[in-house]
Amino acid sequence: MPRLSAPDCQLRSTTGTYNKLKRRFYDRPTLEVARDIVGKYLVFDSPEGPMSARIVETEAYIGQDDAACHAARGKTRRNEVMFGKPGFTYIYFIYGMYYCLNFVTESEGKPAAVLIRAAEPVDGIELMQFNSPGKRRLDLLAGPGKLCRSFGLTRDQNGLDLTGDIIYLEERSKERVKISTSARIGINQATEHPWRFFDAETEVRLK
DNA sequence: TGAATGATGCGCT
DNA sequence: GCGCATCATTCAT
């Protein structure tokens, strides 16, 4: 871990005063968690430096009865973290070039997770731009693949404990977020469920 | 401004 | 082989 510069120290010191979400936040019905994550802040103390962002869009993937959930066809090496305790990262590789970040929800044995689809960059924007060259600020995290690329998240961060100090969620204010819902994006199974949640007033727009 | 398509690798049938 | 919780590029309107 490199020495932290002055702005980085400011970020690190402030995180101590914010409310880091505990395991019980994730140990709840996935639809509630997915809705409540919108407006929370994702913090990643990466090897290259700290970054944070305000999450504006999520999707819920709920158990073995949800045909669109990776756990629908049983436990494999790829999806095994979803079957474990809540409050851990589930990061998978897709389309030959992208990673997607999820947070495991519900009690151990019930495989479910929330996909983090989009966020507004807050801290470490220069590092995000280094990871995603040429992108404007509001495009850096506008989509699950771009979010992982800009944050530098890969399989290396799969299965990390969200109650630790590397990657976690913070509540930085008690803002009341106006949330809209829709069907989930990019799936061909269980398309009838409105399990996508997004900040209706954010500047970050997908598609 | 939107539809079509190619890139690219892995997990599963 | 085929499909995939994506995205950038190309082409048509």
Image (tube, coloured by chain):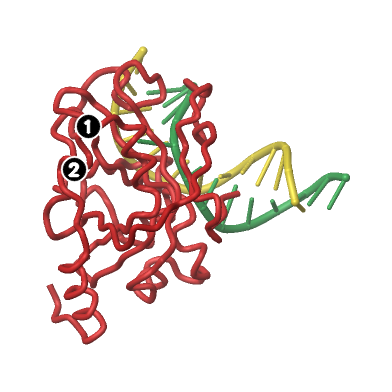
Chain colours: A red, B yellow, C green
Secondary-structure class at tag 1? helix
Work out whether A65 lies above or below A40. Answer: above
Identify the image quadrant of the N terminus of chain A. Answer: bottom left
Q: Is disc 2 surrounded by few (<14), some (14 to 19) or many (20+) residues within 10 Å?
A: many
Residue under pointer 1: A82
For image coordinates 51% across by 68% down, the residue present is A135
Residues at marks 1 and 2, CA–CA distance in whole angstroms: 8 Å
Q: Quadrant of residue A164?
A: bottom left
Which chain's residue wears label 2?
Answer: A
Q: Nearer the viewer, residue A16 or A190?
A: A16
Q: Nearer the viewer, residue A110 or B1?
A: A110
Query: Number of marks in the image?
Result: 2
Task: Locate residue B5, reporting x and y percent.
Answer: 64, 40
Relative to residue A205, is residue A59 drawn left or right?
left
Task: Locate residue A137, reporting x and y percent.
Answer: 49, 69
Sequence-wise, which precedes: disc 1 or disc 2?
Answer: 1
Q: Are marks 1 and 2 in contact (CB under 8 Å)?
A: no
Residue under pointer 2: A88
Q: Nearer the viewer, residue A164 or A170?
A: A170
Q: Is disc 1 surrounded by few (<14), some (14 to 19) or many (20+) residues within 10 Å?
A: many
Q: Quadrant of residue A115?
A: top left
Work out whether A173 lies above or below A1. Answer: above
For image coordinates 40% across by 19% down, the residue present is A67
For image coordinates 34% across by 47% down, the residue present is A37
Secondary-structure class at tag 2? loop
Relative to residue A103, is residue A133 drawn left or right?
right
